[in-house]
Each structure stands twice: as structure tokens, then as C-alpha cells.
Amino acid sequence: MFDIGASELLMIVIVAVVVIGPKDMPLAMRTAGRWIGKMRKISGHFRAGIDAMVREAELEEMERKWREQNEAIMKANPVLPDLNQMGAPTGSDVASVDSAAAQVETAPAAEGEVASSTKPATQPSSQAELHLPPPPL
């Protein structure tokens, strides 16, 4: 940081011993160490604040780009049609499928056929119509 070589450091130590004196040198070194520690702490805090501001600015920039890309995608791809437009079964269609299934279940088995206890492959229209076996104990 300051680019101080060994010879320059030796010169500073000799001048400090001559000016301060060998008796007060330990106290001066402690004081200098405290000041250097405080300076490092303040510079670290300042650097962390700058880094946080940069990260926040980058995050805002990324969010702006994401919004722009999202809007471009939404404009390029129209909204999907809802189920009624796609030809999904309506309430009357479901009722007719349920009544047909009921007729198949109640029809007697022809002679020579084994009565099937399975239901036809229809989806129940609600959760209440599911016939699940009891849970194991």
C-alpha cells in the first residue's frame, strides 16, 4: 500500500528511537498500533458500505432487465385461453359421463360372463366420489 522497503523501515525505527527515546518507545508503539487498528476498522466499514451500495445498484439493474425481458416475453406470447375456450368438459358433460358410468355398473352380466367389479375409466368430478380403500393399520 505505502510501498515501504526494509531500508526505509529501518530508518524510521532509528529516527523514532532517537526522537521518542528508548524508554517511551513501547508506549508510542502501542498508541500507533491502536491508531492503525482504528484506521483499518474505519476503512473496512467504509469499504463494506461502498460494496453494499454497489451490490444494491447491480440488483436494481438486474431487476429492471428482468422486468423488461418479462414484458417482451409476455408481448410475444399471448395469454393461454382458459379451459372453457379449449373445449374442457362442462358441468353437463361431466353429469352425462357419470350417468353413463352408473348404467354400466348396474347392468347385469350376460350369461357366461364374469361380473366385473371394476369401474370404467372415468375421472370422478369431485374428491367425494373417490372410493379409496381404508388405510392399513
Image (spheres, helix red, strand yellow):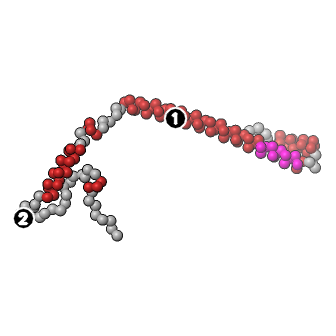
Tell me where residue 120 appears, x and y as whole percent.
18, 55
Residue name at image x 21 percent, y 52 percent? 122
Question: In this figure, which residue is indicated by the disc labeled 1?
Answer: 62
Nearer-the-camera pick, 25 or 87: 87
Mark nearest the camera among 2 and 1 is 2
**SS of the residue under disc 1:** helix
| Rendered position, 25 above or below 71 | below
Tell me where residue 133 appears, x and y as whole percent.
28, 63
* Real-space Cα separation, disc 2 to disc 1, in angstroms: 73 Å
Left-right relation of 58 to 20: left
Question: In this figure, which residue is indicated by the disc labeled 2?
Answer: 112
> Which residue of the protein is positioned furthest toward the bottom in this rendering?
137
Nearer-the-camera pick, 15 or 115: 115
Residue name at image x 26 percent, y 36 percent? 85
Check residue 28 for magenta coloring. Answer: yes
Left-right relation of 30 to 68: right
Tell me where residue 108 appears, x and y as whole percent.
10, 60
Nearer-the-camera pick, 123 or 21: 123
Quarter of the image where the N terminus is located: top right
Question: Which residue type carries mark 2?
Answer: Gly
**SS of the residue under disc 2:** loop
Q: Magenta segment range? A: 27-38
> Which residue of the protein is positioned furthest toward the left in this rendering?
111
Q: Give residue 59's quadrant in the image.
A: top right
N-term mark: 2 or 1? 1
Quarter of the image where the C terminus is located: bottom left
